[in-house]
């Protein structure tokens, strides 16, 4: 491997994954930063030359990667989500696709100035929306109602449909140019759809049967699943061009909705692989763009984008949702969210290469126009979707609620302190002890009578308003299992549990601490036994407002070394959970929720004994006294 090839591969990996991480930090659409990274790596610096790096294998690799991404998208599609939405989704990927194609064709012909034949191809390319862009936006906006399911299903299913139509249109245009009779478009679409569905379904059934009969060892299940995806894509694509995309999508949908085996581990593996492939693809394809051709489009490209967004998409959604159960606000939101993504870019790049080989006039405009649409739709939709959802009253509130496992008396006191602190309106307790549940209800708390590990609890918990888990039971195993179960839902950074009570086990079994438990609450020594003993001795939950006159050092002097800081509440209401790993030092202006021994309250800072000592919060949440 040459040094330049190594630099190119490293640049793709660093810029791709780095853009994903930076987008998460800045709360921006990842695809926007990925495209900027590709521009930097390709036209601006020349770090990546995809054609030189991959040669003739560039577009087969791109097509296969897109197939794997669509398989991962199919794994997220649950048939239960459809209910009364089947007709809407069918119309969006059929009638809506046709309307988008017609509008895009005439916009390319009248505004961009392409030939009518080439305009037909361009209009077909922009039928797709793209789950690689839609799904991250939906996770960021979190709209209410049925609109999220509609957009998710449409985004995943429209990609193979749009790509198939675009390929058949291109074949028809080239056939006319060569004097041959063009293929019947409708017949070609049906043949491709049937072949893709059959191959994908067979591959999914075979894989499930192998897993069900334990014919695949655990350590090979993810690699063999990937092997089946690659094989299904290739087989379907060899039989009928572009049938591979539908085959992998159908395979994913089948696996997601069968009930014979659990595919949770496969879903997680494909999510990680999908992020890696998506990041690399955008860097590679954006690096092929020539800036001079992009600038040549000028206002014509902007006009095409405006027609696609302001006329094509709203018209397609309006027609497709007539008589549907969607509300007017859900229809409006759907009409204003159709970003284009990786499939549009890859199909346009492939078409440009094929048209270049036959020296088709105007082919050089396809790729820059596609990138302009992708960048424009992602930027506009990405920055406006949240505001639009709030305007249409479809936006869900930020998930600031807390789910607490356990309903002991002192846990109820802690829950009431969190609610009184104004940091979270939703505090929900779950416990399997009816006496504790009854007492918590008498205290006015929201509580569910169930085991946290049961499906009953999962069905009754409204996770749209809850973002953190606190596991506070006396059973370390239950706490750990609850943390594991909700880590996928809330993120590992937001699941907490009391430290394991067996210190010797915790010292020697490092893997248990790191991978099988949540973050340790309050400090490495603040176990359930410790807290229970303190409360039995009369300790109470106290809320203390820290000021310049009464800073954290004064708090430690007054309440002594046995005080256990638990939470910090900002003036804005933001809550910080104090753990063994965050090393946060409280400061003036914050409200501290802590476990303290009952003492007479000071009237002012001067009443605090000067010789009480100075206590500093260490990273493990405990305190040391400085004389």
Image (tube, grey):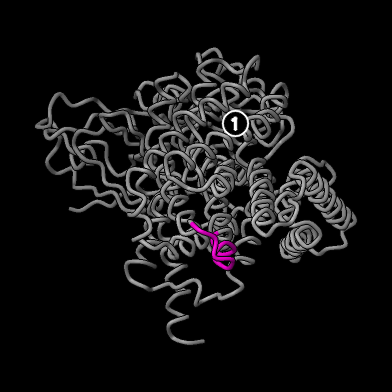
Residue 368 visible, this orientation: yes
Looking at the image, which is closer to me, 381 or 273? 381
Residue labelled with disc 1: 99
Looking at the image, which is closer to me, 421 or 329? 329
Which residue is found at the position 82% from the left and 46% from the top?
A: 194
Examine the rendered structure and indicate whether residue 585 appears above or below residue 37.
above
The magenta segment is: 352-361
- Residue sitting farthest toward the bottom: 2
Q: Main secondary structure of the magenta part?
A: helix
Percent x, y of residue 446: 54, 19
Which residue is found at the position 76% from the left and 50% from the top?
A: 183
Assign a secondary structure to mark 1.
helix
Percent x, y of residue 246: 73, 49
Say if the magenta span includes residue 359.
yes
Instruction: Tell me if mark 1 has few (under 14), some (14-19) or many (20+) residues whose alpha carbon lies within 10 angstroms of its own.
Output: many
Residue 211 image-quadrant placement: bottom right
Say if the magenta span includes residue 346.
no
Looking at the image, which is closer to me, 385 or 625? 385
Left or right? Give the position of 417 relative to 154: left
Examine the rendered structure and indicate whether residue 423 appears above or below residue 322.
below
Percent x, y of residue 372: 41, 48
């Amino acid at each position: 491997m040459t040094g330049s090839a190594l630099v190119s591969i490293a640049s793709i990996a660093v810029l791709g994954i780095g853009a994903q991480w930076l987008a998460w930090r800045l709360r921006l659409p990842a695809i926007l930063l990925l495209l900027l990274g590709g521009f930097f790596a390709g036209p601006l610096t020349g770090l990546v030359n995809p054609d030189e790096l991959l040669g003739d294998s560039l577009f087969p690799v791109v097509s296969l990667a897109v197939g794997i991404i669509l398989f991962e998208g199919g794994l997220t599609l649950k048939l239960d989500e459809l209910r009364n939405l089947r007709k809407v989704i069918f119309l969006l990927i059929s009638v809506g696709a046709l309307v988008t194609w017609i509008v895009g064709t005439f916009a390319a012909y009248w505004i961009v100035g392409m030939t009518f034949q080439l305009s037909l191809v361009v209009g077909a390319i922009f039928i797709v929306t793209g789950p690689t862009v839609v799904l991250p936006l939906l996770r960021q906006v979190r709209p209410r109602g049925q609109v999220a399911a509609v957009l998710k299903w449409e985004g995943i299913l429209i990609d193979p449909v749009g790509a198939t139509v675009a390929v058949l249109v291109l074949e028809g245009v080239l056939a006319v140019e060569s004097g041959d009779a063009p293929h019947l478009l409708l017949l070609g679409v049906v043949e491709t759809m049937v072949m893709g569905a059959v191959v994908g379904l067979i591959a999914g059934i075979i894989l499930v049967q192998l897993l069900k009969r334990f014919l695949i060892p655990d350590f090979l299940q993810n690699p063999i699943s990937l092997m089946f995806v690659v094989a299904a894509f290739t087989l379907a694509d060899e039989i009928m061009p572009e049938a591979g995309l539908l085959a992998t999508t159908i395979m994913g949908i089948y696996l997601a909705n069968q009930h014979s085996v659990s595919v949770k581990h496969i879903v997680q593996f494909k999510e990680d692989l999908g992020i890696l492939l998506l990041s690399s693809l955008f860097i590679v394809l954006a690096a092929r763009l020539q800036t001079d051709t992009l600038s040549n489009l000028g206002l014509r490209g902007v006009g095409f984008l405006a027609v696609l967004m302001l006329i094509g998409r709203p018209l397609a959604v309006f027609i497709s949702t007539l008589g549907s159960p969607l509300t007017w606000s859900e229809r409006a939101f759907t009409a204003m969210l159709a970003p284009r993504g990786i499939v549009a870019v890859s199909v346009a790049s492939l078409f440009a290469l094929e048209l270049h080989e036959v020296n088709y006039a105007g082919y050089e405009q396809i790729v820059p126009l596609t990138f302009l649409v992708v960048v424009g739709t992602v930027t506009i939709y990405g920055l406006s979707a949240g505001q639009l959802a709030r305007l249409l009253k479809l936006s869900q509130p930020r998930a600031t609620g807390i789910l607490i496992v356990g309903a002991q008396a002192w846990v109820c006191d802690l829950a009431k302190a969190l609610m009184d602190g104004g940091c979270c309106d939703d505090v929900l307790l779950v416990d399997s002890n009816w006496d504790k549940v009854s007492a918590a209800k008498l205290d006015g708390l929201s509580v569910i009578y169930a085991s946290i590990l049961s499906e009953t609890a999962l069905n009754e918990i409204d996770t749209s308003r809850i973002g953190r888990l606190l596991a506070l039971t006396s059973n370390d195993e239950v706490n750990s299992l609850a943390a594991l179960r909700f880590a996928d839902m809330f993120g590992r950074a937001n699941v907490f549990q009391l430290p394991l009570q067996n210190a010797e086990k915790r010292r020697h079994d490092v893997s248990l601490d790191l991978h099988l438990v949540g973050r340790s609450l309050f400090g490495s020594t603040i176990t359930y036994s410790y807290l229970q003993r303190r409360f039995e001795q009369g300790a109470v939950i106290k809320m203390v407002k820290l000021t310049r006159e009464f800073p954290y050092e004064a708090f430690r002097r007054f309440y002594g070394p046995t005080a256990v800081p638990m939470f910090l509440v900002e003036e804005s209401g933001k809550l910080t959970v104090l753990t063994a790993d965050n090393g946060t030092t409280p400061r003036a202006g914050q409200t501290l929720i802590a476990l303290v021994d009952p003492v007479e309250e000071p009237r002012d800072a001067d009443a605090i004994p000067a010789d009480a000592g100075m206590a500093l919060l260490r990273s493990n949440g405990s305190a040391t006294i400085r004389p």
